[in-house]
Structure formats: C-alpha cells, structure tokens
Amino acid sequence: MLTRKQYQLLVVIDQHLRNTGFSPSFEEMKAALGLKSKSGVHRLISALEERGFLRRHHHRARALEVLRLPEEMVPANGDAVASALSPAERQGFAPNVIRGDFSARLAGVRAAPAASAVQLPLYGRIAAGLPIEAMRDHSALIEVPVALLGNGEHYALEVAGDSMIDAGILDGDTAIIRRGESAENGQIVVALIDETEVTLKRLRRRANSIALEPANPRHETRIFPAERVRLQGRLVALLRRYP
C-alpha cells in the first residue's frame, strides 16, 4: 500500500516521463505535491524505491525510472495526474511539459505510435576533433523523432570539429547517443578520457588498450590504457539542419 503522497508522486513522475522522456526536477515535484521543502520529495522517493515502484539512477541528473504501477494507477478518464491530486493541488499544478499519449516505454524515454517526437536532454558540444570537456546543460532539450530511437536511455550532443567527416558526421550535427558503458569494435562512441575530456570516435580495442579512431586522414588515432577511457554511450543517429 502506498500513502496518498507516495501515490501522487509516482503519478507525477510517471506522467512526466510519458510526456517528456525524462523525470521531473525536485523543484517540479515539490510544486506538484504542494510540499514546502525538497527533503520531503527525497523521503517519498526513498519510500517508493524501498517498495519497488521506483529506481533512482545515481550520478545522473533527473534519472528516475518507474518500475511498476499500482493497478489503480490509471483512472478510466486517463488523466492520472488530475485524479491523484486534491482539488487545491490540482489547481496549482501546471507542469512545463508537452502533453501526449505515450505508452511504449524506452527506459528513460517514453513514446507511442501516435507520438512523432520526444524531447531529449542536450548536453552541449562534443569535439569530433580534439577532445574537450563535456558541457552539460540540463535545462536544454531537443526534439527527436521517435523513429530514430530504440530501447534504452538517450541524450544528444552537438558535434564540433571535422575528424569524423568520412563517417558522415559534420561540424554542427547533433549526435543522438544511447547511454551505456559498452560497445562493439568499430562502433562510434562517446568516450570519456581521464574523467575530464570527451570525444566522439570509432572504438577499437587492442589487448589492454583502447584506440579512438578518427574518420579523417588528417587526424591521428589516439591510444590509451583501457583504465583511462570510460564509454558514455554509442552513436545511434544524427540530426542535421540545412541553411
């Protein structure tokens, strides 16, 4: 059994994931439930985790995953959020989301055949030439067609540089990345070097080393001990704007 506030919070998180593809901020959850402090939100999230309704992905911003829903979660009229909140809370609840009917879950991104696009976090520019430190702006979002995404959690990065042009990746493109720490040889990955530098390159494993290969003969392959490189995800799609 869930308390009323636990139930309300689960509804708010689930609806936000359905509509945007990422979980609400603590400030949004606090406002939605009419709580006075974020500590109350933390306690509710911990309780939902203990009961097996929610999973929190630590070391990631706004990364909550709904594992299961109570049977009574979705009312007949389909407006779960409005039904879960009291009249006073319902009046003051105005989340900044795009409403839609999303049903097929993508583990961090939710979509349905009726939806043409979802919003993904845009984490700034990544060098496809020399590595640069990733600049994460969690307030920035980009709309991505659902057809480009598969299972898993995704994010977007803007490409800077020309070292991957022979792979069709140009300066200014938006790379759609499936988050993960594993990839096959030959796949194009986002690699974190020494926990500070990030680059987009083709992955080659060589014994206890990792080679990050460019797709431009004017750039050199860089080889690192495996322990210095941590994969942040692999490329699954590109978006490009034409002038």
Image: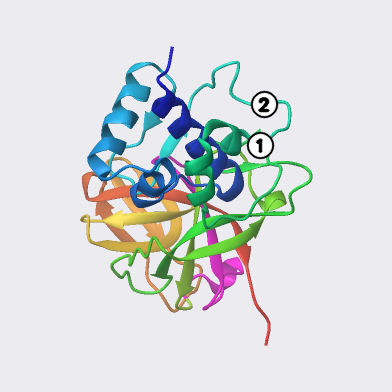
Going by the picture, which residue comes out furthest to the front?
88
Q: Which residue is mark 1?
A: 79
Count residues near mark 1 (Cα–Cα under 10 Å), then give few for <14, some for 14-19, many for 20+.
few
Q: Which mark is residue 33?
A: none
60 sits left or right of 140 in the view: left
Question: Which residue type does callout 2 highlight?
Answer: Pro
- Mark 1 touches mark 2? (CB < 8 Å): yes
User: Residue 51: percent from the left, percent from the top?
Assistant: 37, 16
Which of these two is toward me, 162 or 2?
Answer: 2
Q: Quadrant of residue 125?
A: bottom left
**Residue 30 in view (yes/no):** yes
Q: CA distance from mark 1 to mark 2?
A: 7 Å
Give the magenta part as a residue range. 163-186
Residue appearing at x 44%, y 45% in the figure: 32
Q: In the rendered image, which quarter contains the N terminus?
A: top left
Asked if 233 appears above or below 152 in the picture, the reply is: below
User: Residue 53: percent from the left, percent from the top?
Assistant: 44, 22
Is residue 177 highlighted in magenta? yes
Q: How many marks?
A: 2
Which of these two is toward me, 234 or 102?
Answer: 102
Is residue 165 highlighted in magenta? yes
Q: In the rendered image, which quarter contains the C terminus?
A: bottom right
Residue appearing at x 58%, y 71% in the figure: 166
Count residues near mark 2 (Cα–Cα under 10 Å), then give few for <14, some for 14-19, many for 20+.
few
Asked if 56 appears above or below 1 in the picture, the reply is: below
**Residue 187 in view (yes/no):** no
Q: Which mark is residue 75?
A: 2
